[in-house]
Image (cartoon, rainbow, N blue to C red):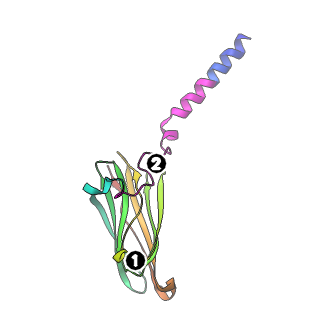
Amino acid sequence: MKLRVVATAIGVAAVALFAASPANAQVAAHRYDHKDPYKSGCGNAARVVKTGKINSRANGQVGTIKLMWSGKCQTNWIEISTATSAHGIISVYTEDGRYDKFSFKAGNRGRHWGNMVWAKDMCAWGGASVQWNGGRGGQNGAGTTAKACG
């Protein structure tokens, strides 16, 4: 009977250690994950940490993409500028495997941003794809930012 109690105690300890391990904790959602940076107040003092171009094979550069950082909230998100008629997807990624994908519609004078992911002391990067007039005939583009590590 003592052997069973010891084995059970070791099993419980192993589960507790696994649950508290950094690899398991990394995928946990954080307070600001998937939230709008401007509605949350995180965007008020944010800065651009990486930039890139949104390019189309047929039309050349069709926009810009920026990886944003909020020191106040310890978060990253992506902002883009493109044609007012464009719609698409904005994505931001962190090195621990979390990400956010945000679909935007045409309008807003071509300025769009995605939701945030918490990224304190880790690398983050992002991408965007845009499309206009149905996307046919090269009426689409994509761009990415380089990684920024904090």
Residue drawn at (29%, 48%) of the image:
72
Label 2 sits on residue: 96
Seen from this angle, which residue lies furthest front? 39
- Of marks 1 and 2, the one in the foreground: 1
Label 1 sits on residue: 107
Closer to the camera in the image, 12 or 100: 100
Question: As drawn, is 99 to the left or to the right of 61?
Answer: right
How far across and how far down the image is residue 86, in percent?
43, 79
Closer to the camera in the image, 67 or 43: 43
Element type at marker 1? loop
The three-letter code of the residue at mark 2 reads Asp
How far across and how far down the image is residue 2, in percent?
70, 10
- Mark 2 crowd level (few <14, some 14–19, many ≥20, 10 Å Cα): some
How far across and how far down the image is residue 79, in percent?
35, 66
Q: Give the magenta part as a residue range.
A: 12-39
Q: Which mark is residue 59?
A: none
**Quadrant hosting residue 108:** bottom left
Residue drawn at (66%, 15%) of the image:
6
Seen from this angle, which residue lies furthest top? 2
